[in-house]
Amino acid sequence: MSWKEFDKIPAQERALLEQEKYERIKKLLSDKEQVIAEGNILIVTHGGFMCTLLAVILNLPLDVVGSISISNTAYVQIYFSGSEWVIEKTEGITLPASLQINDTVQDYVRSAL
């Protein structure tokens, strides 16, 4: 499906597709927690996936995903701390200034991004 075709999908159906992507990424991260002790994992992907990945890790609401700005060649370096996924480094990613989240996460986002 092309972006032009995706844009023509009614908003309600598009929201369901975004929710499905969010759940798939949560499952991917959960599955990788089990094997992470074996070494590094490289995921090469597009900006839409990366935005949703950030939303999952930072526990952001799904409606924020479209407001995250990802430039070409942007990247996110994450690791599993043993109990949670942590953003170690980013490049080319901007969260919306109007993002309203709790202070702990907000401080973390400011330092990580």
Image (spheres, rainbow, N blue to C red):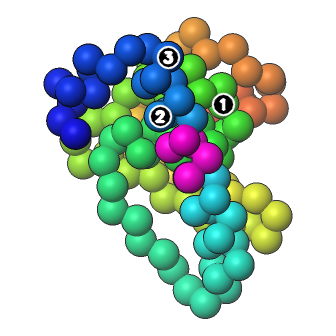
Residue at 68% of width from left, 64% of height from top? 30
Kindly give the residue lying farthest to the top in the view shown: 98
Residue at 79% of width from left, 70% of height from top? 82
Q: Percent from the top left, x then y, of residue 112? A: 58, 42
- Which residue is labeled 3 in the image? 12
Q: Percent from the top left, x then y, of residue 61? A: 65, 26
Instruction: Please identify, in this view, whether the residue under mark 1 or under mark 2 is nearer the observer.
Output: 2
* Left or right relative to 64: residue 47: left
Is residue 96 in view from this perspective? Answer: no
Label 3: element kind: helix
The local crowd at label 2, few if under 14, some if 14 to 19, many if 20 or more residues have their Cα within 10 Å, is: some
Q: Is residue 22 magenta?
A: yes
- Which residue is labeled 1 in the image? 60
Q: Is residue 7 magenta?
A: no
Q: CA distance from mark 1 to mark 2?
A: 17 Å
Task: Tell me which segment is drawn in magenta.
Answer: 20-24
Is residue 74 in view from this perspective? Answer: yes
Mark before the other along the chain sequence, 2 or 3: 3
Q: CA distance from mark 1 to mark 3?
A: 20 Å
- Residue nearest the viewer, comparing 52 with 58: 52
Residue at 49% of width from left, 58% of height from top? 77
Q: Which mark is residue 86?
A: none
Q: Say which quarter of the image contains residue 86.
A: bottom right
* Left or right relative to 39: residue 8: left
Asked if labels 3 and 1 touch by Cβ distance under 8 angstroms, the answer is no
